[in-house]
Amino acid sequence: MTNAWLDAPAAAVAETARTLLGWLAVVDGVTIRITETEAYLGLGQDPASHAHRGRTARNAAMFGPAGHLYLYRIYGMHTCANVTCGPVGEPAAVLLRAGQVVDGADLARSRRPAAKRDVDLASGPARFVEALGLPLTAYGTSVVDGTGPLTLRPPTEPVPAERIQAGPRVGVTAAHDVAWRFWIAGDPTVSAYRRHVPRRTG
């Protein structure tokens, strides 16, 4: 299998997110099989995207070449990992939402001592990053040429199309009903869906 997803135009980011299901995320002793992803566009096309209003110091990686990490912090303490997939200057990225630890479980458990079950080790974007031990300093590094700490490897066999489901994204305040979250049906590591509920202002 080739890394054809690297050449996906911004308009094909949803297909890229679907394609990455089943791929392996490898970081120094821990391997996670990706079971859930989310797609994001930018530059006025997707109000849920960090790149919606243009380039900033925070989202600069989204405007760079495909196959690189866009990492960001949430709540000041958790890191989420995205893989860029658009042409240079056309921001698009896929959030790695959840996965199954298939190698290095002991190491992953040491990083996630609060996880009661192995299926919870990487169930959620922050947990995914924590289980891998991926540092924020990996921002902007390649996931395909071996120069960065994380390497993405294709599966031996792709996930059958009939096992892939799509639905609304999670944790966004805009365009939350866009069905750009993809997951492997029936996989216990997929994170729990919680629909966005707007805050009451009066």
Image: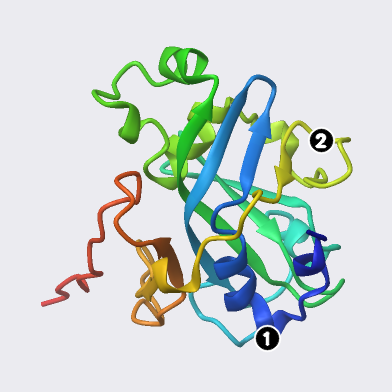
Q: How many marks?
A: 2
In the image: residue 201, left or right of residue 54: left
In the image: residue 85, left or right of residue 175: right
Cα separation, mark 2 vs mark 1, equals 27 Å
**Which of 18/177 is in front?**
18
- Say the numbered circle drawn on residue 11: 1
Q: Is residue 50 visible?
A: no
As drawn, 130 above or below 154:
above
Q: Position of residue 27 (x, y in %)?
A: 67, 29
**Which of 104/50 is in front?**
104
Q: Position of residue 89 (x, y in %)?
A: 84, 75
Three-letter code for the amino acid on which mark 1 is drawn: Ala
Name the residue tied to disc 2: 148
Disc with the residue nearer the chain's start (2 vs 1)? 1
> What residue appears at the point 50 percent right and 66 percent down from the top-left corner?
160
Element assignment for label 2 = loop
> What residue appears at the point 68 percent right and 86 percent down from the top-left corner?
11
As drawn, 158 above or below 98:
below
Mark 1, Cα crowd under 10 Å, few <14 / some 14-19 / many 20+, is some
Element assignment for label 1 = helix
Q: Residue furthest left?
A: 202
Q: Position of residue 146 (x, y in %)?
A: 86, 36
In the image: residue 74, left or right of residue 103: left
As drawn, 22 above or below 161:
above
Q: Position of residue 76 (x, y in %)?
A: 46, 38
Three-letter code for the amino acid on which mark 2 is drawn: Gly
**Which of 105/168 is in front?**
105
> What residue appears at the point 80 percent right and 68 percent down from the top-left corner?
4
Q: Is residue 71 visible?
A: yes
